Image (cartoon, coloured by chain):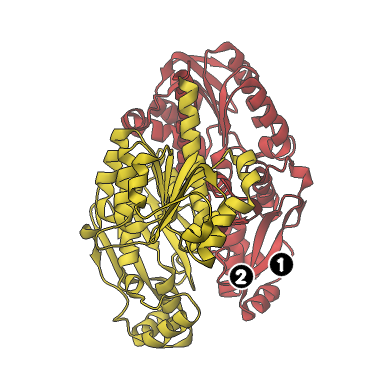
Chain colours: A yellow, B red
C-alpha cells in the first residue's frame, strides 16, 4: 500500500512511531506493508516514491520540521500531490475544523476523486459533509473509513454496526467527550465548580487551553453525527444537531442529581429522527454513568437489547491503532476483490 | 438456506417466533431466506423438504409436542437426518451439557462432516472440544459460528475480535453469568446472605431451580474457554480452567469489600497462558462492576487500551438474534465465495 499521510499532530506522530516500531508485525501478522510516499503537515510535504522512513520523518518533525529531513523532495502544495503521486491510500490526521472542515474536507474529496481509499481521524469534514462524501466514495468505488473519529481506540462504529446486523437499531446514546466527562465527574465527586474543575482538567492535560470545542458540546455533536449516519443511516450533517454544552452547569445541580441517585452527563443522542447534544441525567448505575475521561456508547436494538461499550475515548497511540484497524479492513476489501477477478 | 433446527427450549422457540414474525424483513433486508427442512427436540424430529412453517411448529411444540404438528414426516432419530436431508446449515439450540457435551457435540460434528455450516448457542460441546471442532470445520471448509454462547444478544466475540485487529490482545476478563451477578449485587445492596439472595433470584426467574451450573462457576468457565480460543487463540478446553464458584461467599466479605470501595464479582479471566474463574474484587467504578443480571467483558489490548462491553447477557429473543447475526455472517461468506468463481 502506497500511502500519503497528512497531519502530524499527536495521532500522526503516534502512527509514525507504530509504523516504525511494529513494521514487521504489521506486515507479517496483518498484511500491512505500508510505503509512505508522502508525509505532510501544515508547513508542506516531503515525497519519495520509494518510501520514507517513518522513524526518520518523526525525528525530523520533532527536530526542525519536515524540511530538515534531508531525504525526498519538499513541496509546499501537499494537496496537489494527491493527483501527482501514484498512491493507493490517503491517511488524514489533520486537526478537526468544524467551521468549514478544512483542510480535511479537501484532502478527502480530492483523494476520493483520484480513486484513493481514505482513512480519516479528523471529525470536521466528515461531520459537515458526511452524506456527500459517502456518496462520492461509493460512486468512485473507494473505501472511506473513520473508526478513529469516534471513541479513539475503541471500535465504537464497528461495534454499533455489529449490533445492527439482523436487528433494528433504534437509538444511539453516548458519552463521547472525555474532557467534559472528566469535568462533570469532578464536580460530582469533589463539589468543585465548573470553572475549578475545568482549570484542574487543563492542568492535568485532559482539557486544551482553548476548551471551546469540548465544553460547547460541538465535539460530541460531530461524533453523534458520524454515528447517526454510519450506524443508523440517518443522512445528517452537523447543522442538524441541537447542541447545548456544559458551561452553564451549576455544581448545585450536579449535587442535587447525585442525591437522587443520578449523574449529570453530556450525552449525544440519535434516534433515527432527532439529533441532540445536551447535559442530561442518567442513573448512577447506568453503564453510561462512566467516570473520569472515559467514553461510553449505548446502542439500543429492538430484539437484542441495549449494548454499551466503554473505554478510553482518546489518545495518540489509541487513535493511531484505529487507523491501523481501518487499514486492515481496507486491505481485506481489496484482497477479496482481487480474488474475485 | 435449508436449515435443520435442533433444540426447542427458550432460544429455539424464540427463533421460530422471529422467523415467523420477521420473515419478510429477514429476507429483504438481510438476505436470510431460511427454509426449515427439519426441526428436532428431545422427543424426535419433523422433516419436510419444502420447508416447515415456523409459526405452526411453535404452536405444535407448545400444544402437544412436535408429533402433533400434522405436517411433514416424524422420525425419532434426528441425528441420522443430517446425512439424509439436503441441508446447508445446522442451527444447534440444544441445552448446555458440560459432562460430555451431548447432544450438541454429536450434532455439530456430524454436520461439519457432512459439509453443513453450523450455528450453535450450546456451550458444552464447544467448551469441551473447541480446538478439535474448529480444526474439523476448517478442514472441511465449513463455517462454525457461536455468537450466542457468550453474552446472549451482546456481540461479545465479534467485539473482541475487532479490538484485536491490528492490535495485540493481552487479556479478557468478564462477568459472564447474570445469575451469579444478580446474587452478588443483591448481597452488596441489601445485605442478604447468599442463600436468601439465591432464593430471591429463583423466585424472580433469574436463577434456575437447579442453579449448580451458574453458582459453581462452570457456566462462566465454558464462556471464558470459548473467548480464550476465539479471541486470544489459546487452544484450550474446559478442563484447563481453574474454577471456583460463589457458594462460599460470605455477606460479610461483600460488605467489607464495599466499605473499601470494591465490589465482589465472579470473573472469568484468560490471559493467553492461564484460564481461571473465581470471585474477585474490582473497583466499584470499574466497568466490570455491573449490577443485577448484566454481563460485562473487558478486552485489554496493548496499543488501544481496555475496552468493555456491557449488556443483558441472556434471554430467548436476545440469543435468537445472535443466531440471526451468525446466519447473516455465513451468508456473507458464502456470497463472497460464489462471486469468486
The answer to whether residue B160 is seen in the rendering is: yes
In the depicted structure, whether residue B116 falls above or below residue A86: above
What residue do we see at 34% from left, 64% from top?
A: A220
What residue do we see at 46% from left, 64% from top?
A: A295
Residue A125's image quarter? Answer: bottom left
In the depicted structure, whether residue B26 falls above or below residue A120: above
Residue B58's image quarter? Answer: top left
Look at the numbered discs 1 and 2 and tell me whether their residues touch, using CB distance below 8 Å.
yes
In the image, which disc is placed on residue B249?
Answer: 1
In the image, which disc is placed on residue A277?
Answer: none
Q: Label 1, secondary structure: give it.
A: loop
List the residue tagged with mark 2. Answer: B187
How far is the residue under mark 1 from the one under mark 2?
A: 10 Å
x and y percentages locating residue A2 in the rendered image: 48, 40
A171 vs A25, left or right, is: left
Residue A161's image quarter? Answer: top left
Chain ID at mark 2: B
Task: State the count of labels.
Answer: 2
On the rendered image, what quadrant is the N terminus of chain B found in? top left
Amino acid at each position: 500500500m502506497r500511502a500519503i499521510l497528512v497531519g502530524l499532530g499527536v495521532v500522526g506522530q503516534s502512527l509514525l512511531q507504530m509504523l516504525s516500531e511494529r513494521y514487521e508485525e504489521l506486515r507479517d501478522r496483518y498484511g500491512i506493508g505500508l510505503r509512505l510516499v508522502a508525509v505532510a503537515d501544515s508547513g508542506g510535504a516531503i515525497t519519495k516514491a520509494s518510501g520514507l522512513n517513518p522513524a526518520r520523518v518523526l525525528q525530523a518533525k520533532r527536530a526542525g520540521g519536515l524540511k530538515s529531513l534531508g531525504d525526498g523532495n519538499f513541496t509546499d502544495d501537499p494537496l496537489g500531490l494527491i493527483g501527482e503521486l501514484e498512491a493507493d491510500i490517503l491517511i488524514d490526521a489533520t486537526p478537526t475544523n468544524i467551521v468549514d472542515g478544512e483542510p480535511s474536507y479537501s484532502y478527502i474529496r480530492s483523494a476520493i476523486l483520484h480513486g484513493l481509499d481514505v482513512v480519516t481521524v479528523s471529525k470536521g469534514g466528515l461531520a459537515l459533509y458526511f452524506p456527500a462524501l459517502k456518496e462520492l466514495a461509493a460512486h468512485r468505488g473507494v473505501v472511506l473509513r473513520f473508526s478513529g473519529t469516534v471513541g479513539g481506540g475503541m471500535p465504537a462504529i464497528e461495534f454499533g454496526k455489529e449490533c445492527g446486523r439482523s436487528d433494528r437499531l433504534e437509538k444511539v446514546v453516548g458519552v463521547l467527550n472525555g474532557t467534559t466527562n472528566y469535568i462533570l465527574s469532578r464536580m460530582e465527586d469533589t463539589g468543585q465548580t465548573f470553572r475549578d474543575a475545568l482549570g484542574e482538567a487543563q492542568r492535568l492535560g485532559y482539557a486544551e487551553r482553548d476548551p471551546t470545542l469540548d465544553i460547547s458540546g460541538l465535539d460530541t455533536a460531530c461524533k453523534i453525527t458520524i454515528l447517526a449516519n454510519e450506524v443508523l443511516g440517518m443522512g445528517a450533517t452537523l447543522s442538524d444537531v441541537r447542541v447545548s454544552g456544559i458551561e452553564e452547569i451549576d455544581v448545585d445541580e450536579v449535587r442535587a442529581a447525585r442525591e437522587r441517585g443520578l449523574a449529570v452527563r453530556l450525552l449525544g443522542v440519535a434516534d433515527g429522527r432527532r439529533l441532540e447534544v445536551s447535559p442530561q441525567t442518567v442513573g448512577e448505575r447506568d453503564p453510561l454513568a462512566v467516570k473520569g475521561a472515559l467514553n461510553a456508547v449505548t446502542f439500543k436494538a429492538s430484539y437484542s437489547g441495549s449494548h454499551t461499550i466503554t473505554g478510553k475515548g482518546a489518545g495518540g497511540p489509541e487513535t493511531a491503532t484505529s487507523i491501523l484497524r481501518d487499514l486492515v479492513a481496507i486491505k481485506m476489501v481489496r484482497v477479496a476483490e482481487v480474488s474475485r477477478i
